[in-house]
Amino acid sequence: MKKKKRAEVWPTMVTPFKDDFTIDYKALEKLVDWYIERGVSGLFAVCQSSEMHQLSLRERVELSSAVMKFTAGRVPVISSGHISNSLDDQIEEVKAIADTGVDAVILVSNLLAEESESDSVWKERMKILLASISSEDIKLGLYECPYPYKKLLSPELLEWIISTDRFVYLKDTCCDLDMIKERAEIASGSNLKLYNANAASLLGSLQTGYAGYCGIMTNFHPELYVKLCDTWFEGTEKVKNLQNLIGLASVVEYQYYPVNAKYLLQMEGLGFTLKSRKQDYMGLNSSMRMEIEQMREISKNCRF
């Protein structure tokens, strides 16, 4: 019988800001240590959770470089920062992020075509992008970022992506177990690793062959995801109960993110302000704060 192996957990990092809304690198260093101390497999340094759409290219590059420095080789780092509509600007962004030395540059799926455009248009633009970053030393990934719209890869596009042999990582945001099963079958035996961003379907996705979890909730209790990814194959009641807990807790994603995550990280003593370029932190009301406080206590006291 083939031995099951642990799955991986990749936090989608949030960006700490000072009161003047500049990046707080002192808090960022503490955040990197906090993730690693909780057993994560790698870090997604610049993504939507990082408020990448509100960061300049220079800031995205500096943020990627800082995370590389702070990890000091303890875990791999991937980064996106790929936000422009112009293909020429996208090429510039990808090359700039690649120059930071990250382990993979993650492309955003919704930037290769408008929502109304066909998969063939998407594929032709991707061919141009790939030709511009022809170095095989640059590993690539894809991120089905929900903003400004969610572009899910069709089975045909997924097969084509795999056939290029350029991609090693997919952050899957389909949140659909039937689609997850289909994707796992398509990617089976390839170099493309699939990572689920959806907490509720995580255990089911691991059972189909997904490589792990890459999602928002790693900013609240990454250790619970590490535990599930370490033990998912045991099939015990404890594993099922842990899945139930993280699935239910994940509804806070829809509360007031990323400010609510910054509130929890502030309670963890990481020196965070609640400042965000995306949202007014004052929108995190008293009831929301109590919900985060209570979820934090449950997470710390659960025994799985």
Image (cartoon, rainbow, N blue to C red):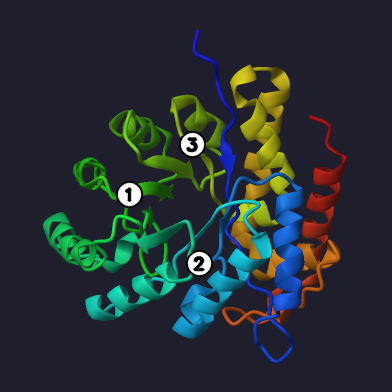
Q: Position of residue 17 (x, y in %)?
A: 68, 80
Q: Residue at x 70, y 32 (%)?
A: 242
From the viewer's perspective, is 260 left or right of 99? right
Q: Of the residues shown, which amino acid type is indicated by label 1?
A: Phe
Residue labelled with disc 2? 48
Q: CA distance from mark 2 to mark 1?
A: 20 Å
Mark 3 vs mark 2: give the one in front.
Answer: 3
What mark, if any, has residue 167 been given in the picture? 1
Q: Residue at x 46, y 77 (%)?
A: 53
Q: CA distance from mark 1 to mark 3?
A: 14 Å
Quarter holding residue 21: bottom right
Comes first in the chain, label 3 or label 2 = 2
- Between 110 and 227, the residue placed more toward the observer is 227
Residue labelled with disc 3? 211
Q: Is residue 22 above or below residue 64?
A: below
In the picture, the quarter occupied by the C terminus is top right
What mark, if any, has residue 93 been given in the picture? none
Q: Report the residue that reaches farthest toward the top.
A: 1
Estimate how packed mark 1 is, as few (under 14), some (14 to 19) or many (20 or more) residues with alpha carbons within 10 Å.
many
- Between 254 and 44, the residue placed more toward the observer is 44
Q: Position of residue 129 (x, y in %)?
A: 22, 66
Mark 1 vs mark 3: give the one in front.
Answer: 1
Comes first in the chain, label 2 or label 1 = 2
- Between 36 and 143, the residue placed more toward the observer is 36
